[in-house]
Image: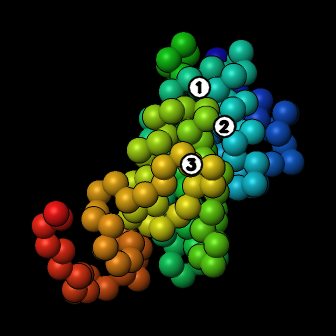
Amino acid sequence: MEDFGSTALRRLLEVHGSSVRHTHANLGDATVVVDPTHIVEVLRFLRDDGELEFEMLMDVTAVDYVEEEPRFEVVYHLYSLARNHRVRVKARVPEASPVIDSAVDIWPSANWMEREVFDLYGVRFEGHPDLRRILLYDEFEGHPLRKDYPKERRQPLVGPRN
């Protein structure tokens, strides 16, 4: 019996092959790396395709490859309730312009997840309805999960707001 993750990757290659940069499915860990300019169409396909039905966005996060370019990897974890399977979708964005399209129109739950990635890594989500800090205060300088963020950095003190 074929692994469903492999089926998802095969369907993606069939329909969006030009958007796919790399895939692997080791031990049920189905992962696809896509061109960031096509992230919305790939995510929408994974949700809407009748053979796949990845209707749940479980997480959006990022990885900082400080020594590489493109530096940031935005990672989406999807789950199919109907088929009880997962797939991971990745897209790399450069340090000079860490921007990728928002998935909020596909999954409203992406709203807070994208805000967290923006707050902690500085990746901007184009088309996000309310992209602002979610965990840190507005005056906080920098993005603390970037690997080059100085751990002893002093932040501006903020008094009570009137």
What is the three-letter code of the residue carrying label 2? Leu
In the displayed structure image, the side of residue 22 where residue 26 appears, left or right: left
Give 94 or 157, whichever is nearer the viewer.
Answer: 157
Residue tagged by mark 3? 128
Q: Nearer the viewer, mark 1 or mark 3?
A: 3
Secondary structure category for the residue under label 1 = loop
Residue tagged by mark 2? 43
Q: Is residue 105 above or below residue 68?
A: above
Residue 162 at x, y percent in the picture: 16, 63
Residue tagged by mark 1? 54
Say which quarter of the image contains residue 156. Answer: bottom left
One can see residue 33 in this view: no
Neighbourhood count class around disc 1 (C-alpha, 10 Å): few under 14, some 14–19, many 20 upward: many
Secondary structure category for the residue under label 2 = helix
> Which callout, 1 or 3, points at the residue further toward the start of the chain?
1
Residue 118 at x, y percent in the picture: 46, 60
In the displayed structure image, the side of residue 84 where residue 52 appears, left or right: right
Inter-mark Cα distance, 2 to 3: 15 Å
